[in-house]
Image: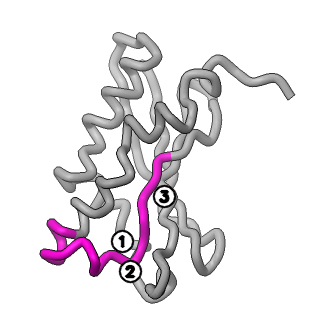
Amino acid sequence: MPTTSSERIFTPQRLAALFPPDRANAFFDALYGDAEDGAYDIALAFDGEHDNGLEFSFRLTQRPGHCLACNLTYGLPQVFERHPVIDLPGVVANIANALGRAETTRWRLLPTREMSRTLHVIPLLVTFG
């Protein structure tokens, strides 16, 4: 199956640069005062193109010895929207920059989806106007 130009742009390396793996530790350090208390790692993934934009997701992967299903991941979209460590406006601005898009960029998070006991995802829709 051929890859789209967006798939060629949003490689695993680019996604890790847009949302570095160590940001999860900084997030938990800000929330709990200790990164070790975090139950999951957070990674940004590219999921594809849609009508007037792109779909990404934050993938929450259970850390060894922790319980992802026991954590309140369903309230995270509201937390992610405004948490300065997650910095969604900055992430979205960097996504637009990677595409060379100058027009207005809008984004929204969808509700958390439980893919398995060890993986939950928070979809991020980015549209260009």
Give the image quarter of residue 37.
Answer: bottom left
Taking depth in this image into account, of 66 and 95 the one nearest to the observer is 66
Using the numbered discs, state the Cα–Cα distance from disc 1 to disc 3 in whole angstroms. Answer: 10 Å
Cβ atoms under marks 1 and 2 closer than 8 Å:
yes
The scheme the figure's colours follow is one colour
Highlighted range, magenta: 29-44
The mark closer to the camera, 1 or 2, is 2
Q: Are marks 3 and 2 in contact (CB under 8 Å)?
A: no
Asked which secondary structure carries label 3, the reply is strand
Q: In this view, does 92 lie above or below 44?
A: above
Q: Name the residue under label 2.
A: 72
In this picture, residue 64 sits left or right of residue 26: right
- Tag 2: residue type? Leu
Which residue is at 36% across, 25% downward? 105
Residue 30 forms part of the magenta stretch = yes
Residue drawn at x 18%, y 75% is 34
Q: In which quarter of the image is residue 106?
A: top left
Is the N terminus in the top left, top right, bottom left or bottom right quadrant? top right
Q: What element carries label 1?
A: helix
The quarter of the picture where the C terminus appears is: top left
For label 1, the residue is 75
Residue where numbered disc 3 is placed: 122
